[in-house]
Image: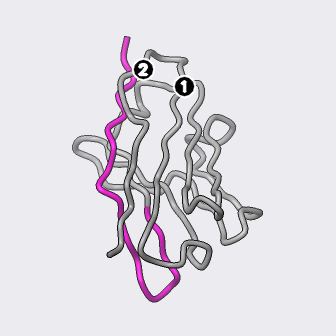
Amino acid sequence: QVQLVESGGGLVQPGGSLRLSCAASGFIFREYVLTWYRQAPGKERESVAHIGWSGDATNYADSVKGRFTISRDNTKNTMYLQMNSLRPEDTAVYYCQVTNGATTYWGQGTQVTVSS
């Protein structure tokens, strides 16, 4: 049974930090590329950060470059999103997604709210 379990969301003040985790099971994690998406109220889901199989190749949306860092630990079957210098406009539900080109799985989403 495939599972992607996200954690780490919550309420944080502007300028603060959060670390999201996405724990995977039920498939060969190291064979999948990983992406964090987010969806704010009334907006389309957008890609935030992407990482390749080994973790060497990453790319980011312009809006989060220099503030967010995506990583993966293939020994723990877990992906992470370190979010620093958070802004109110980062408020959204964050989703992890994994794909091997043929199959795609999504996490259930975790709420991140940036507010004073």
What coloring was used for the rendering?
one colour
Q: Front-most of 35 and 21?
A: 21
Percent position of residue 92, x then y: 34, 39
Quadrant in which the C terminus is drawn: top left
Number of marks in picture: 2
Residue positioned 35% across, 59% down in the render: 107
In the image, residue 30 lies at what x, y percent? 62, 73
Mark 2–mark 1 contact, CB under 8 Å?
yes
* Residue 88 is inside the magenta segment: no
Q: Secondary structure at mark 2?
A: strand
Other residues around mark 2 within 10 Å, as few (<14) / some (14–19) / many (≥20): some
Q: Earlier in the sequence, mark 2 or mark 1?
A: 2
Residue type at mark 2 is Val
The residue stretch that appears in magenta:
97-116
Which residue appears farthest toward the left when viewing the image? 42
Q: Which mark is residue 12?
A: 2
Residue at x-position 39% and y-position 49%: 6
Q: Quadrant of residue 110?
A: top left
Q: Position of residue 105 (x, y in %)?
A: 38, 72
Q: Label 1: how many residues lie within 10 Å, few (<14), some (14-19) or many (20+)?
A: some
**Residue on which the image places disc 1:** 17
Image-based side of 23 in relation to 1, left or right: right
Instruction: Please state which amino acid type lies under the numbered disc 1.
Output: Ser
Taking the spot 35% from the left edge, 73% from the top edge, the residue there is: 2
Task: Where is residue 66? Give x, y as percent.
Answer: 69, 37
Q: Is residue 105 magenta?
A: yes
| Quarter that holds the N terminus | bottom left
Q: Residue at x 63, y 34 (%)?
A: 67
Residue 94 badge = none
Rendering quarter of residue 11: top left
Question: How far apart are the two marked residues, 2 and 1, measured between alpha carbons?
Answer: 7 Å
